[in-house]
Image: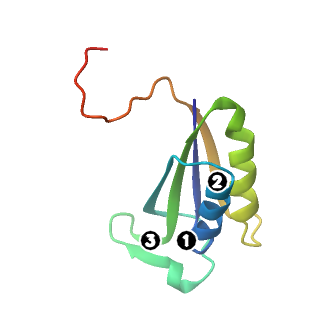
Amino acid sequence: MKEVKAFIHRGRVVDVIHALEDAGFGYLSVSDVKGLLTALSAQEQVYSMELGERVTRQIKLEVFCEDDQVDRAVQLIRLHGRTGQSVAGWVYQSTVDRAWPIDGRVDND
């Protein structure tokens, strides 16, 4: 199993999520984060007291999928996350060693 993590502009996240869902990807997680992507507009930027500089409000999207689905997930994120900038975000892939459902049962594995 793989985790595909992407940092993308807020204005592109809806299109990315719809494309992934339409392609059958169901294990998605979306978080608001602050980072150093180049802002598309002043509305995306906020001043970070912790960092002492302007940061961009962006989205961290996490997709969990089988190994043979990774290329398709990355392709959809890169296609639908485009903004016209040379770098509109980043996509990372990691291996997930194990996953468990939270199902209410108690077992000792």
* Secondary-structure class at tag 2: strand
Q: Position of residue 89 (x, y in %)?
A: 64, 59
Total labels: the figure holds: 3
Seen as rendered, the residue at the extreme top is 109
Q: Position of residue 13 (x, y in %)?
A: 58, 67
Residue tagged by mark 3?
Answer: 53
Residue tagged by mark 1?
Answer: 10
First reached walking from the N terminus: tag 2 or tag 3: 3
**Which class describes the residues within 10 Å of circle 3: few (<14), some (14-19), or many (20+)?**
few
**The C terminus: image quadrant:** top left
| Label 1 – label 3 distance at C-alpha | 20 Å
First reached walking from the N terminus: tag 1 or tag 2: 1
Seen as rendered, the residue at the extreme bottom is 42
Give the side of residue 104 with respect to residue 37, left or right: left
Residue at figure coordinates x 71%, y 64% from the top left: 80
First reached walking from the N terminus: tag 1 or tag 3: 1
Residue tagged by mark 2?
Answer: 90
